[in-house]
Image (cartoon, grey):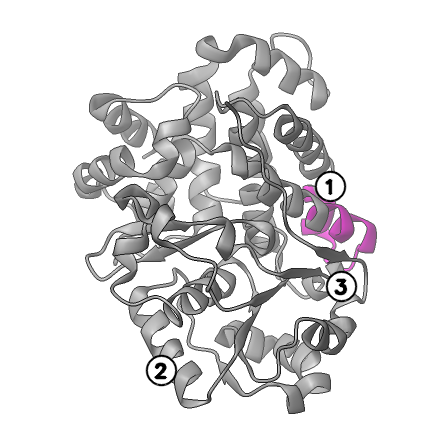
């Protein structure tokens, strides 16, 4: 029996963020907490979105770390309760949106976040009482604005997924114009995150043909437009297509991700160095593609066709070449990851929820070899 869920209401267009006030009213949110990060404050994006609805916002939390933590969620929850909030508006990339989901969950659910992690059987413990959330992405990458999950580094140090249909935002407001000021490096890194979502969900062995169709369109769209968006941040057409690709990645990863994300989640949980999720995906993707190609030869042929590559072309090499063109890291060493981090990363990858839906599931030794190859 296959269950397929697509539940998000999405407002998508240039200038869509101007509708936030009306969407707050429609959701009956009178005192929401706004969750963002300091980068949005410095870039002026937070003011651009929030100023027209300032009177409707009860409090603003901007201390979201690059990889959201349970500690940050507790701090935001304290502000939420002190301000008598009735919901959350999350503005930013995946980190503020995921943190917003954690706050919405914790506002109505007691106990540590780890008890609600999917890997610990937490899916069934998350009830419909989760506070309502409106998500406004300012990067074209994670797709968290339409996803049912949130990645949080819990107090134990593990980076765990909170997954439930009750965590899907009540509304996603997708305004490509909010990404115009994103620097080239972050445009490229978040774009590769979207591309990887579409690659991995298409290759996932679970049965979900609608998700696979979305994934293939997302792969083609991201592959075609990521360079233009990176080279010219004001290219409105490229920004539109990249935000759509990110949205598609978020819709399709309901089908499950794979070994790239198992590794990225595991490495991203390190306290030092702090590693960017999209960059990690880019480094790992070619190696995982090579590892799993023989196991999914038919799907690899389709991917080559969709991307306009010749039959039999080295897909992993094509991804590596794209990373170089985007001036992204191609090795873990460039990112500050050392061989000493391999054992804990392998352990965490094996227990990551994405491992279960990998096209070809690595064992401990194979994960270690993938990490060594990526160094």
Q: Position of residue 214 (x, y in %)?
A: 68, 33
Is 244 in front, or is 325?
A: 244
Q: CA distance from mark 1 to mark 3?
A: 16 Å
Q: Is residue 74 left or right of residue 250?
A: left
In this rendering, the label closer to the viewer, 3 or 2: 2
The front one of 208 and 137 is 208
Residue at label 1? 225
Q: Are marks 1 and 3 in contact (CB under 8 Å)?
A: no
* Residue 5 falls in image quadrant: top right
Q: Is residue 240 magenta?
A: yes
Q: Residue at x 47, y 27 (%)?
A: 286
- Find residue 54 and report its horizontal and vertical position in percent: 65, 88
Q: In the rendered structure, which disc, 3 or 2, sits on the residue that comes first in sequence?
A: 2
According to the image, label 3 marks what residue? 177
Nearer to us of marks 1 and 2 is 2
Distance of label 1 from label 2 (alpha carbons): 41 Å
Which range of residues does the magenta coloring cover? Answer: 226-242
Residue 347 in the image: x percent, y percent? Answer: 20, 37
């Amino acid at each position: 029996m296959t269950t397929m869920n697509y539940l998000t209401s999405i407002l998508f267009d240039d200038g869509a963020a101007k509708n936030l006030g009306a969407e707050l009213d429609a959701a009956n949110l009178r005192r929401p907490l706004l969750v963002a990060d300091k980068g949005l404050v410095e870039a002026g994006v937070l003011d651009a979105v929030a100023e027209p609805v300032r009177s409707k916002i009860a409090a603003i939390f901007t201390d979201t770390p690059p990889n959201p933590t349970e500690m940050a969620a507790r701090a935001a929850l304290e502000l939420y309760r002190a301000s008598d909030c009735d919901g959350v508006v999350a503005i930013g990339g995946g980190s503020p949106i995921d943190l917003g989901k954690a706050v919405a969950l914790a506002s109505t659910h007691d106990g540590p976040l780890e008890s609600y992690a999917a890997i610990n059987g937490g899916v069934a413990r998350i009830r419909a009482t989760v506070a309502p959330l409106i998500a406004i992405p300012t990067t074209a990458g994670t797709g968290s604005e339409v996803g049912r999950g949130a990645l949080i580094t819990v107090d134990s140090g593990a980076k765990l997924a909170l997954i439930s249909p009750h965590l899907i935002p009540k509304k996603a407001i997708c305004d490509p114009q909010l990404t115009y000021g994103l620097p080239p490096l972050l445009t490229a890194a978040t774009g590769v995150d979207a591309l990887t979502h579409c690659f991995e969900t298409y290759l996932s062995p679970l049965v979900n043909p609608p998700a696979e169709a979305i994934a293939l369109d997302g792969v083609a769209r991201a592959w075609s437009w990521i360079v233009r968006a990176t080279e010219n941040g004001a290219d409105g057409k490229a920004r539109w297509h990249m935000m759509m690709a990110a949205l598609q990645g978020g819709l399709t990863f309901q089908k499950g991700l794979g070994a790239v994300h198992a590794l990225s989640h595991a490495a991203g949980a390190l306290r030092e160095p702090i590693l960017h999720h999209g960059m990690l995906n880019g480094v790992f993707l070619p190696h995982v593609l090579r590892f799993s190609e023989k196991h999914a030869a038919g799907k690899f042929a389709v991917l080559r066709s969709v991307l306009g590559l010749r039959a039999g072309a080295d897909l992993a090499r094509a991804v590596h070449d794209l990373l170089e063109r985007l001036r992204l890291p191609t090795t873990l060493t460039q990112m500050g990851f050392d061989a000493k981090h391999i054992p804990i990363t392998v352990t965490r990858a094996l227990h990551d929820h994405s491992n279960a839906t990998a096209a070809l599931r690595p064992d401990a030794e194979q994960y270690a070899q993938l990490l060594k190859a990526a160094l």
